[in-house]
Image (spheres, grey):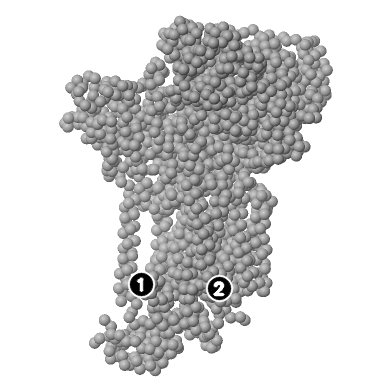
Amino acid sequence: MSITNLLENWSDFRHQHPSEDRPHLEYKWAMSIDLDSCTGCNACSVACYAENNLPVVGKEKFAHGHSHHWMRIERYWDNDGREFADQGAQFLPMLCQHCESAPCETVCPVGATNHTADGLNSQVYNRCVGSRYCNANCPYKVRYFNWYDYPTTDNVWPAPMEQQLNPDVTVRGKGVMEKCTFCVQRLTVAKSDARTEGRLVLDGEVQTACQQVCPTGAITFGNLVDPLAKVGKQWMQQQVDLNKDKQAKDAAEDAVKLRGYRILEELRTYPSVMYLEQLRESAI
Amino acid sequence: MYSFLRLSVLLVGLVVSAGSYAVKAAQPLTTADDLGPNVEQPFEFPHDRHAGDAADGGMEINCMYCHTYARRSIVAGIPPVQKCVGCHQNIESVREAPRIKKLFEYWDAKKAIPWKKVHDLPDFVRFNHERHIQRFVFAQGKPVQEACGYCHGDVKKMTVARRQKPLSMGWCRSCHMKDHRIDATSTKTSQGPNDCWQCHK
Amino acid sequence: MIENGFNRRNFLKVLGWGGATVALSGCGNTSVEDGREFVTSYAETADYIIPSIGTYFNSTCAQCDAGCGIMGRVREGRVLKLEGNPESPINNGKMCGLGQAGVQAHYNPDRIREPLLRNGDRGEAITWEKALELINEKVGSVNPENVAFLTGVVSGHVKALLNNYLDALGSGHHYVYEAVAPSVVRASNKKAYGVEMPRLSMDKAKVIVSFGADFLGAWVSPVHFSQQYARFRKPDNGERGVLVQVESKMTLTGANADRWLAIRPGTEGILALGLINSLAAAGLPVSEDVAAAVGEYTSDRVSKDTGVSAEHIAKLAALLKERSPSLVIAGSAAEGYAHGSQNAAAIALLNQVLGNVGQTVEAPSSVPFPQMAPSTGNSFALQSLSDDMAQDKVKVLFSYGANPVFTAPAFFKLKENLKKVPFKVVFAHYMDETAVEADLVLPLNSAMEDWATLMPEYIAEGAQLNIRQPLMEKMYPGTLGVGDILLAMLKQRRPDEYNDYEDFYSYLRSAMVSNKDALGGADKDDDTFWETALSHGVVKLVGEPVNMTGSMSAAALVVPAPFAEDATYPLHLIPAVSASMRDGRNANEPWLQESPDPLTTIVWDSWVEMHPKTAAKLGIVEGDIVEVASKSGAIKAQAYLFPGIHPDVVSVPLGYGHEAMGRYAKGVGSNAFSILDPVFDNETGELAMHETRVKVTKAGQRVIIVKDEGPAGGSQMGRRIALRIPSNKVNLSEEV
Amino acid sequence: MSTRHLLALFNDFDEAVAAIADLRAANIKGFHIDDLILKSPIEHPEVEQVLGDKPVNVQWFTLVGATMGGLLAFILVSAAQGNFFAQLKGGKPIIPLPPNFILTYEMFILGGVFITILGFLICAGLPAKRSPLYSAKVSEDQIGILVQGDESAVAAFKAIFTKHKALEIQEEAAK
Amino acid sequence: MEKDIREDIAWAQINKDVLKSLESPRRIYWVILLIAIAMVGVAVGCEIYQYQTGMGVANKNNSHVWSLYIATFIFWIGMSHSGTLLSAILHLMHADWRKPIYRFAEAMTTFSLMTAGLFVMVHLGRLWQVYYVMPYPNERWAWPNFQSPLVWDMFAIATYLSSSVLFLYVGMIPDLAICRDNIHAGWRKKLYTIMSLGWEGTDRQWRNFRMTYLTIACFLIPLAVSVHSIVASDFAMSNMPGWHVTSFPPYFVAGALYSGCAAIITLFIILRYVFRFEEYMTLPIMRKLVRLTFAIAMVWTYLNLIEFASVWYGHDQTAKDQLIFKATGPYAPYFWAMIFFGSILPLMLAFKRFQTHLPILFVVSILLNVGMWLERWMIISPSFAHGHYPWAWDHDQWPSLIQWGMVFGSFGWFTLLFMVFCKVFPSVSMYEVKEMVYHRSLAQKHKPAVKGDY
C-alpha cells in the first residue's frame, strides 16, 4: 500500500460520496414504479426468479421466512374499518432500493456490499461472510440470506432444472446474503456494448428483467444522468431529488399534487427507486 | 546485567521481520509467472506453428483470426472445426500428419473437438475479453500478441497452450491500478474499473 | 435470422454445459482451475452464434391459450429465459408470470420420457413403433363411431391434422374441453353481437364496468388486456379511465378497481338492468322494449336485491352517463350461474344502451383459414363425452391438452366412466391424473421443443398465425410433438397423402410455404418466406372485420330474483381462477407455486377465503382448517379472512389438490373442482361454476398459513409505504 | 579479588529493614549499597526509604507503545481505505474519521498494554534464571537480603545479619 | 465492624490453603466439570449440524436475521466487565477487599470473552471465511470495512481479550512463583517454572511490577467501557427502531457491570464451597459485593427508565410502536420477566439479612443474570420482529433448539474453562491476601505504614 497515495489524495478521500458537488458522471441507475399502473400480477417477481437464479425454497422453508424473492409484491388494504376493501388493494413491488446512502453498506464488516460508481448497491457473494448485519440495518428488509445450501438441496434445481440457470449470474451457496442487483449482468453487457461504440448506454437499451415483463409498463428504469432518459424526466417532473431526505414539494400546499415519493425517505437512505402514488377516482 | 535485553531485541526483531514480510507478501505478484498444469487435449494444437514468428518457422497468424470472438464477446472462443478445415483442406503438405488426420476425423463426424479449458477462471468471475481487446488492441493500438500475452503469456512459443500467469484477483488488480493511456495518441490515462461488480457476478 | 433447419438444430444442441453456473458451493473454490472443463465449441457455426451471448428465438407460449409471442433466450444450446416477443401484437414483448414459467415445464424433472403402456398398475416403457402399431390396431378394430378425441383448445396445423385424422376415420367425435372458459359469455355475445368474442377496446373506454371479468389476471388474454389497461389508466390526454368491478369475490382486477362493489352472488344481471333503469331515469335515451324490461328495476329494489348501495348505483350511473364511451364486460362471476346466460345478456344490453357497441366493443377480424381457427372449448363437451362413455359408446379415447380427471367435478363420475373405455390413449407431459388412468401414455415434446402453428381466440388487431418452434434440442429422445404423433397416425390411415412428409416439421413447412401467398409471403421465395416467418414468430394475416350487430332485443330478457336462503348450505362457493394456477395444468412449475397469490399472498397451498364477518359468525380465525361441504362432496383447507369477499360467499382457488402430476403439484392443497354441484346454465348447458352452495365447518386443526404477508397483515401501521391519492388531485397529462 | 554472594533470610520485615539500614551505615569496604537486593513475598514500598530511590521506567514504554499503536492504527486503516478504493460507501467519505478514531483508540490501548508488558519484562529483567541464592521461603513469608561484596566483606555482612536475627545465611561464590 | 479477613492467618497457611485448591477440591468439582463437558458436547453437536446444513436450522429468517447468538454474545461480553471492575477500578480505588476475589473475577473476564467470541463465529453464515473480518495483508488487496461496528467489535474484543489475559497473567506472576516453589514434580512444576519467568520477588521486580500493574489497570478501565459501548454501537449505530437509542452505550456498560457482579456472586459461592475458601472469601466481602451489585442494579434500572422515557417523549412513532410491542406483544412475558429480575428482584439485596445469606444469594444472583440475558434478547428479537417495515414483521419467530443448545452449551464451555483454570492456577491471589493481612496487622498495631500506597 502506498502512503503517498494517501497523502496526495487526502482531500479526495475525505469527500463524501456521492454528493451535490460530486455527482455521478456517466451513470446513475434508477427506477420509478407507477403504483397506479401496477396490477400486482407477480410477473416481475417470476421474471426475477428466472433471470437471477433464485431458489424455490418450498413450503416449509417459506413458512420459516426463508423465501428468496428479490422482487416481492406487497399487498396493502386501506379499508379504514369499512366492511369491504372497496377501493381495491394497494400493490407495491418492493425490491432493493439501491439507496445512495445505504445503511447496509457501512455496516458490512468485510466490505461485501459497496456502492458502485454507477450508483448501485453491490453485493459480492464471495466476500460475504454472512454476518447479516446488512439485513439487520436495511429498513426495507429486501436482503435475502441463503439459509441453506440451495445448489445442493433436493427439489430446488433437480436435474435437468439446473439447465435453466442463467450463466451470467452466480448461484449462491449457503451463508451469503443476496438481493436485487438491478440486473447488473444486463447493465454490464449494455455498458460494454456502448463503450465499444464509444458512447453511453441509451435510454431503453437496457431493461431490468422486471421492467421487461411488466405487462402494464409500470416499471421504468434507466440512467438518471442521461437527460433523455424517461426515468430522469419522471424524477424531474415529480420533483423528487435523489440526495434529499425531504422533498421541497411536500411542504407546498398546492391543490394539484405530484405523486412521486420514496419510501421511508425520512431515514435518509436516499433510495434510487421512486414510486408514483396510486390513484383512486373520487367520483365513484 | 542487561543480558535480558537479548530477548527483547529478539522479540522486536521478530515483530519487525514478520511485519516486513507481511508487507512484502501484500504486494501482488504483478508480473511473476505462475505456470499452470499441462492440460491434456484431444490432440496437440501447435500454437507456435500457427502464431509463432516467421523466424522460428511460425506463420504469424493473428490470434483473433481463430479466437474470433475475443473482440465481440466476453469469451475468446475456440474456432469451429469448420475454420480449421477451411484452411487445412487446401494444405496438402500436412494432410497426412496424424494431428490433421484426427482433425478431419472430427470434421467428417461433424463433431466439435472437446478442447479443455486452459485459462479457466472461477465461475463467479466476469472477465470480458471484448473490453480488453477493444482497449488495448483497437484503442491503444498494441500488437495483438502483446495484448493477449499480458494474460495468456507467450503463446506463440507454446504448442499446447498452458497457463503462464496466475490470473488471481490481486494479479488482475495490479494491472487495473495502473494508469493506461486511453488511446494510441493521447497522454490522458485512466485506470481499470475498480468496483466489485465489474468482475464479480 | 435462421438459415435452415439443419443448421438450426445443430445450434440448439446443448453445449458447454458443465458447472457453468455453480459457484460458491461449499467453501467456494476461488482459485483458477485449468483443464477441468470443456470449452464451448462447434463443428460448424453461424455468424450470429457467439459464445456467451444469448441468441433469441421467437415462438409461442403454451402456458395458456392466449397465444402470446415469446422470445427464448438461448445460450450454449440451452433456453434460459422466456421474454415476450415484441412483434406479437398480443403481448408486445410483455409476459406474465405464468408464461415465464414455461421453461420450468420444459426442464421439469417429472416429465414423461418415453411411451408407457399399462401393465396392471404400472406403466411399461415401449417404443414408439410399438405404441403407434398398437394405436393402429386398436383404432382399426373398432367402429369409427366409437373413437373419440378429447382435447383442449386446438388451432393451426395441429387442428388441421386432427380433423383430417378424424375425417380419415370417419368419426366426428372431437370433444373440445376447457375447464374454465368464458363459454356462456361467448354464447351470449354471439346472440347479442353476432360474434363470440368481440374486440374490447379498453384503451378507448373512459369507464370500464366489469362484472367479474378478471381481465388483468386470468380472463381470456390477460397480458394483452393489461397493456390496454395501462393505456386506459394513463392515456395521453391524462384523462384517467375509471374501473368499477362488480363481483362477489375480489379478483386481481377487482383489487385494481377504483370501486369494488361486493354484489350478492348471482344478482349481476339485476344490477345491470338497474343501471339501465337509472340511466334511463337520468335521461339516457333507451328504446321502448328496453325501458319496459328494466322498468321494475328501480334503484331501491336493485340495491336491496344486490346489496350494492343505492348511492353507488346512482354514482355509477352518473359516471357512465357522463363519461362515454364506456365498456361493460361480463366475466365469470356473471356467467357462473344457472341463469348465467340471462346475466350475460343483461350486461350485453347495458353495453348496447350505453352505445358502446362499435365504440369499445368492436368487431374482430375474420380468420382467412377457418380450418385453423381455434376450436374453443367448454365444459359441456366433457359432459357429453362422459355420458357417451357411460353408455359404452367410446371404445378408443384419445386425450390431449386436458386433464379431465382432475378438472371434472366428482358428480361427473369421470373416473368410473373412463374405466368403461377399453383403450385410452393420453398425450401427456406429466403423469397427471388423466395419464394415470390411461392405457397408453404418449410423452409430448415441451413447447420449447415442438413445432406448431397456433391461432389464438382473441387477437388485438387483424388476424395472425403464431408459430411455435423449438428453442433447443429435445431433452429426451423418447418424446414426440403432438403434430408428429398425429402425422404418424395419419400415415396409418392415409399413407398416400402423408408418407411424403418425413416429420411434422416438413409437413408444416410445406403447408406454410405452399400457402405463402395468403400468408403475406407472395413476393418472397420459399426459403426467405419461411425464415422470415420463423424469425418473427408470427405471421400476420389479412382478415376482414366481421359484421357485428348491436341491436339485441330486451323483450325476452328475464333475470331471476336473488337466491333464496338455504339453511343447510348457507354459503355460495366461488371457485377462484388465479392468474398462475388457472385450471391446475401448470401446478407442477415451482415458480408458480412459490409466487404468492397476489391477493392473499399465500403460497404452496389452497385456502378458503371468507369475509371476517362470516368467519366471526362461524367462530373461525385465520389458519383454522375448515371443511367446505357441498351436496357433492367436501374438501378441507385453511381459512383466510379477506376483506374482498361478500359475506355470503366463500372462495377456494382452483388448480390445487393434484393427486398426481409431479413433485411440486402432488398433495399441495385441495381440489375445489371436485365439490362442484351439478347445476348447469339454462341455455348453454355449461356447468354453472358459481352455483354450488356450501356449508363451512371447523375441522378442528389450526395452522399458521404460509404466506408472504406478515403479522401486520395488509396494514401499513401508519407508515408511508404504499400511498394513494384521489385522482382529481393530480394532473396526469403533465406526467412523463 | 573474588566477589561473594550472601543471602540472609529474616522472619520479620522490620528486622530486615534494620539490617539494611545497618549495612548502609556500616560502610563496608568492597560493598556498595546498590548491590543489595531485597527479596520479599509481598511488595514493600517502604524499603525505598533505606535503599534509596530507584527509578521506574515502565511508563515511558507505555507512552511510546500507546502513541505508536494509535498512530499506526490510524495510518494503516486510512491507507487501507485509501488504497482499497473499490470500497465506496454511499453517503460516506472514503476515509471516514469517526470510525478510524475508534480503531485508533482501541489500538492505542492495545499498543500501550503490549509495550508496557514488554517494558516490564525489560525493566524487571524478566524472564531470567533464578539466582542460585534463592529460598522458597521468600515466596512464603520470609524476607531475603542478597548482598554482593568482596570476600573481605563477608564477615561484616554476617555479623550484621546475625545481629538482626537472620534465620539463615546462605553463601556462595560468584562465578 | 466485621473483618474482611482475619489478620492472624499465618502466611504459610495462606500458601497452603490456596495451593490445596490445585490439588484436592471437593468431589463436586468433578461433577461440575463433567456436566460442563457434556454441555459443551451439546453445543459442538449443534454447531456441526448447523455448519453442515446452513444457518436455516437456527430458525431465523430474512427479516429476523439475528437472534440468540447475538443476544448471548452481548451477554457474555457484558459478563466480562465485572472482572475489570474488580481488578482495575477497585484497584485504583484502593479497595482492599477486592484482593481475595479479584483473581477469579478476572479469569471470568477472560473466559466469558472467549465464550463471547465463539458466538460471533457460530453466528456467521460462512464461518470458514471468518478471517475476512481481520485486517491482514493479502494478495487481493482487500480489507475489511473499517466503518462497520462489527469490525470495531473485532478490534475491541481482540484488544480486550489480549489485555485481560496479559493483566491476569502479570498479576499472577508472584503467585506462579509460589506455586513453583512449592510444587516439586510433574508437568505443573515445569509449567509454573516457565510461567513464573524466574520471579524472585526482588525489590526491582516489585517496583516495576507495581507500575506495570497500575498502568494496565488504567488502560483497562477505558478499554472495558469502550468495548461495551462499541458493542452497543452495533445497535445504536443502526437505524432499527428500538436500537437507535443514544443512551445505549452507558446502558450497555451498566448492564455489563451488573451481570458481571451477579456472576461474581454466583462463582464466589461456588468457589468458596468447592475449594473451601471460607477463610478468604468471607461474608463481609460478600456483603460489600452485594451492596455494589445493588448499586449497579439501580443504575441499570435508571438507565432502562431513561431509555423508555426518551422513547416515550420522543417524536419517533416507530420506536414508540416498538416499545409498546415489546411490552404488550408476544415478547411481553420475557420483557416483564426482564424488568422483574433486573429491577425488582435486586431490591432484596438492600436488606441486610439477605446480604450474606448464601443460598438465597446464589439463587438470586443466577436470576439476576437470567434477567440480564433476557434484556439482551429483548434488545435483539423484538426489534427484528417489529421494525420499520410492517410487511416484513414477524411475530412468530421462536429460536430453534439448535440455538438454545448453543446457548446452553456456552455455559458449559465457560464453566469448563473456568473450572480448569481454578484447578491449574491459584484462584485466590496469595501475595495480595498476604498484603491484605500484613496491612491489617500493621493497622492493628497502630503503626502507620511507612510509605506507599497501601
Could you tell me residue B177's position as x and y percent?
35, 43
Quick one: quadrant of the N terminus of chain E? bottom right
Circle 1 or circle 2, nearest the eye: 2
Q: Is residue C92 visible?
A: no
Q: Secondary structure at mark 1?
A: loop
Secondary structure, mark 2, is: helix
Residue E149 position in % (x across, y down): 50, 53
Classify C668 as above or below D59.
above
Q: Which residue is mark 1?
A: D127
Front residue of C528/A139: it is C528
Q: Amino acid at mark 2?
A: Arg
Q: Residue at x 22, y 32 (%)?
A: B48
Number of residues whose C-alpha sits closer than 10 Å to that of mark 1, classed few (under 14), some (14–19) or many (20 or more) = some
As displayed, is residue E134 above or below residue C489? below
The residue that appears at 44% across and 14% down in the rendered structure is C503
Q: Are marks 1 and 2 in contact (CB under 8 Å)?
A: no
Q: Position of residue A239 (x, y in %)?
A: 58, 35
